[in-house]
Amino acid sequence: MENLLIGIDLGGTTVKLAFITQAGDIVTKWEIPTDKSGDKIIPDIAEAINAKITELKYTKEQFVGVGMGAPGPVNFEEGVVYKATNLGWREMYPLKADLESNIGLPAVVDNDANVAAIGEMWKGAGEGAKNLLCVTLGTGVGGGLIANGDVIRGANGAGGEIGHITSIPEGGALCGCGKTGCIETIASATGIARLAKEAIQGGNDSSILRTKFEKTNDITSKDVFEAAEKGDKLAQEVIDNVTYHLGLALSHVANGLNPEKIVIGGGVSKAGDQLLLPLRKQFERFAFPRVAEAAEIAIARLGNDAGVIGAAYLAKTKL
Ligand SMILES: [Zn+2]
């Protein structure tokens, strides 16, 4: 096989790696743990790639280059990560240069949420769309915006940070970014769980969630969707609140982008139609009618592979 691409998705706990064809098919994929001290991350990755090339009896000449998605804002042109404190990297870490010198292949790097959005555009739920809004509802809320087939990176690498749209202007919950009331504090798995706990503590109506909470002292977003499925009123109110704010936030972004597709990924998206149907309703209520008409809302298809596939696409198109 010739002209293979290497896709890397660097996360806080694991590094996902894959060899991918020019058509976007995964030849092989695997994971290694992320070295928390930061210094060994890139040497570890280089070693893992070299070992895999040997194992599969490839040669380095069969590879075009490496694409990588990394957490934190990235200067795309220079290949520098501004700040990724959870990886132990100093300010302005020269990620592209480090990858190239360690692996011996040309490299391109971008923000991880952008790379996941590119993956969904190439081979996932956004396939065929050139204007795409991707939102990942996980522990936090990540976002990627694609206009005319290319990611919007913005003036200093913070383009597409949909998670930090202010939804509660006054008195909202504190967000990891330092502001309060971000959509991340409402529509992330953590946010949904928090809203459910607040609803339980703020009332005394009977609910499956109340019984669960009194027994285990914990509620997850999955519990909320499961309870709503069984007709639980309190759980449904939490979902209605979440989809109201998310639909409103997405309508604002969509009015600026006019996307063909809005792709919802992350753990919370496993709720499927339970999330999509009320979200669609709220989105249509708030978006400019012509924008709502064009935008199909779909669940992400690539799951954990979105990052490596999007990273490989960057290597294919930008090197
Ligand atoms: Zn925030």
Image (spheres, rainbow, N blue to C red):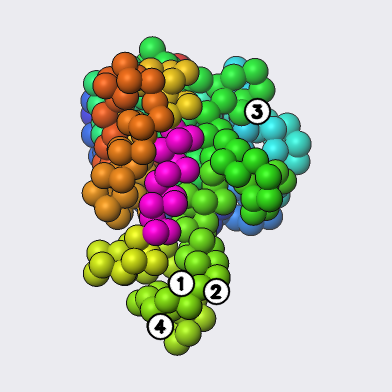
Q: Are marks 2 and 4 in contact (CB under 8 Å)?
A: no
Label 3 neighbourhood size at 10 Å, few (<14), some (14-19), many (20+)?
A: many
Query: Could you tell me what secondary structure mostly forms the magenta stretch?
Result: helix
Dot placed on the residue nearer the N-terminal end, 3 or 4:
3
Is ligand 1 within 8 Å of the beta carbon of the residue shown at mark 1? no
Q: Residues within 10 Å of mark 1 (few under 14, many from 20)?
A: many
What is the spatial separation of the Cα atoms under label 1 and label 3, in whole angstroms? 39 Å
Amino acid beneath label 1: Ile
Membership of 246 in magenta stretch: yes
Reading the image, the residue beneath label 4 is 211
The mark that comes first in sequence, 2 or 3, is: 3
Point 38% across, 55% down: residue = 239
Corner quadrant of residue 287: top left
Disc 3 marks a residue whose amino acid type is Val
Q: Which residue is mark 3?
A: 80
Number of labelled discs? 4
Disc 4 element = helix
Q: Residues at badges 1 and 2 in contact (C-beta under 8 Å)?
A: no
Decide which of tag 1 and tag 2 comes sooner along the chain: 2
Element type where label 3 sits in the image: strand
Q: Which residue is pictured at 34% across the width and 66% down the height?
A: 233
Where is residue 46? Give x, y as percent. Answer: 51, 42
Can the viewer see residue 268 in this picture? yes
Marks 1 & 3, CB-CB < 8 Å contact:
no
Query: To which residue does mark 1 refer?
Result: 219
* Residue shown at the point (31%, 49%) measured from the top left: 275
Tell me the tag on residue 188: none
Horizontal arrangement in the rendering, residue 99 relative to residue 264 (left or right): right
Rendered image quadrant of residue 230: bottom left
Q: Quadrant of the N terminus?
A: top left
